[in-house]
Image (cartoon, helix red, strand yellow):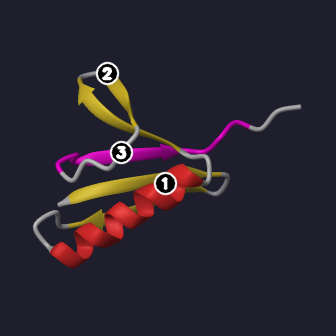
Amino acid sequence: MAIQIVMDSTGDTRHFFNPDDARELVKAERRFYELTGTGFTAAVRTGPGQVSQMRSFDPNAEETVFLPRLVGG
């Protein structure tokens, strides 16, 4: 089971999906591009204490975290 974690001002929302299920995979890919298209940064864990920014959907990523754009002023 893979997971997409969306961080926002209310905390986080977790979306689990089975990468072997074509329908779930399509939903996960759509979610990835919808979130990154609205300004979220996607990151995947690459090792202990290491992350890497993702610019395209990776169906093999076990855990993807979406971080909102920082708001300042």
Mark 2: few/some/many CA within 10 Å (<14, 14-19, 20+): few
Q: Which amino acid, by three-letter code, is at mark 2?
A: Gly
**Residue 37 falls within the magenta-colored stretch:** no
Q: Number of marks in the image?
A: 3
Mark 3 or 1 closer to N-term? 1
Q: Nearer the viewer, mark 3 or mark 1?
A: 3
Which quadrant of the structure image shows residue 53? top left
Mark toward the start of the polypeptide (3 vs 2): 2
> Is 46 situated left or right of 64 in this image?
left
Choose between 44 and 12: the one closer to the eye. Answer: 44
**Residue 55 position within the rendered picture, expressed as x and y whole percent measured from the top left:** 40, 39
Camera-side residue of 32 and 2: 32
Residue lying furthest top in this view?
49
Q: Which mark is residue 6?
A: 1
Q: Position of residue 32 (x, y in %)?
A: 42, 56
Q: How packed is label 3: few (under 14 Cα within 10 Å), some, or many (20 or more)?
A: few
Instruction: Report the quarter where the N terminus lies.
Output: bottom left
Residue 66 falls within the magenta-colored stretch: yes
What's the magenta region? Answer: 60-70
**Image quarter for residue 44?**
top left
Kind of residue indicated by mark 3: Ser
Q: For the residue marked with disc 1, what is the amino acid?
A: Val
Residue position marked by numbered label 3 in the rendering: 56
Q: Considering only vertical position in the picture, is 12 above or below 44?
A: below
Q: Are marks 3 and 1 in contact (CB under 8 Å)?
A: no
**Drawn side of residue 39 relative to residue 35, left or right:** right
Disc with the residue nearer the chain's start (1 vs 2) = 1
Distance CA(mark 3)–CA(mark 2): 22 Å
Answer above or below: position of 20 versus 73.
below
Labels 1, 2: front one: 1
* Residue 49, percent from left and from top: 31, 21
Residue bearing the label numbered 2: 49
